[in-house]
Image (spheres, rainbow, N blue to C red):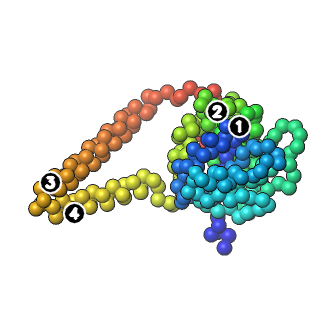
Amino acid sequence: MREKSRISNLIIVGASAGGYQALREILREFPADVPAAIVIILHLPLGSRHELAVSLGRFTRVPIVEVDKSEPLRQGTVFVPPPGRSLTFRDQTIAVATTYRTSGDITTINRSFASAAKAYGQRVIGVILSGLLRDGTEGLRAIHEAGGLTVVQNPMEAEYSGMPASAMEDLPVTFCLDLSDISPALELLVRRDTQFETGLAVAVRTLQKRVALLVRLGEQSRRNPGTREFLMKELASLRRDLQSIDGLMQRVLVEEPSHASPKRQRPPATV
């Protein structure tokens, strides 16, 4: 029974000031069948009315669950804890800490990330978005040391750069990405160890069906020259698109070894 609930990957996201808008952008693009459980920790004022799951739910096809005590982790689901509470992960379950942190530095993200790293190792992807101060840096370190992947929003474009800049300064971050790249990157990375059909495979299969349909329609449109001309133009357009893609891939493969690594505060680590 437990094997059926086993998650392939865990994406855990930490954010603070400016993070809500970033989360909306990321979740908007997630497919409903994403092969990962997604956990979001957003710093909010203690005692604030907790409607994060409802408000974010308007921008995503992925179901969002508020975690009050504990929940079994499920793929294709977003989990959100109450404000000010850290999380623990064990036996395919997410549990909310029973106490709030009321003084000192806020470490909600660090503690949650560390627990995720201990439970899921290389199957964790830790993400730090816009926010103030440093919470999340040590949590990302735990994920990196456990063999997981670490993703940081580019501090140069984050609304508040404190949390992303801290991670980039102190850690060998795997990926530093603009916000627009984070969602497609996560979708790609969570499929690296699964047998799910990749987005590229879906695109190829869809293209094959379209080409086959155009051919069948073309064969039956010989008595209608106008329609046949349109169908042949569609086939020719598809051929040009494929040639363009092939040419682009050839250029990338030729140029890639000579490309210098992008300038970063620390070189990315290989995990």
Do tag 1 and tag 2 residues touch (Cβ < 8 Å)?
A: yes
The reply, left or right, for residue 204 in relation to residue 139 is left
Crowd tier of the residue under label 1, counting other residues whose Cα lies within 10 Å: few below 14, some 14–19, many 20 or above: many
Q: Residue at x 82, y 48 (%)?
A: 47
Helix, strand or loop for disc 3: helix
Crowd tier of the residue under label 3, counting other residues whose Cα lies within 10 Å: few below 14, some 14–19, many 20 or above: few
Q: Which residue is mark 2?
A: 159
N-term-proximal mark, 4 vs 1: 1
| Residue 230 marker | none
Among the 4 quarters of the image, the one containing residue 220: bottom left
Q: Which residue is mark 3?
A: 226
Pair 4/1: label in front:
1
- The amino acid beneath tag 1 is Ala
Among the 4 quarters of the image, the one containing residue 158: top right
The reply, left or right, for residue 230 in relation to residue 177 is left
Q: Which residue is mark 1?
A: 17
Do tag 4 and tag 1 residues touch (Cβ < 8 Å)?
A: no
Pair 2/3: label in front:
3
- The amino acid beneath tag 2 is Glu
Q: Where 108 falls versus 66 (above or below)?
A: above
Marks 4 and 3, how far apart in space?
16 Å
N-term-proximal mark, 3 vs 1: 1
Q: Position of residue 39 (x, y in %)?
A: 68, 52
Q: Is residue 132 visible?
A: yes
- The amino acid beneath tag 3 is Gly
Quadrant holding the N terminus: bottom right
Pair 4/3: label in front:
3
Crowd tier of the residue under label 4, counting other residues whose Cα lies within 10 Å: few below 14, some 14–19, many 20 or above: few
The reply, left or right, for residue 222 in relation to residue 169 is left
| Residue 216 marker | 4
Farthest right residue? 103
Among the 4 quarters of the image, the one containing residue 222: bottom left
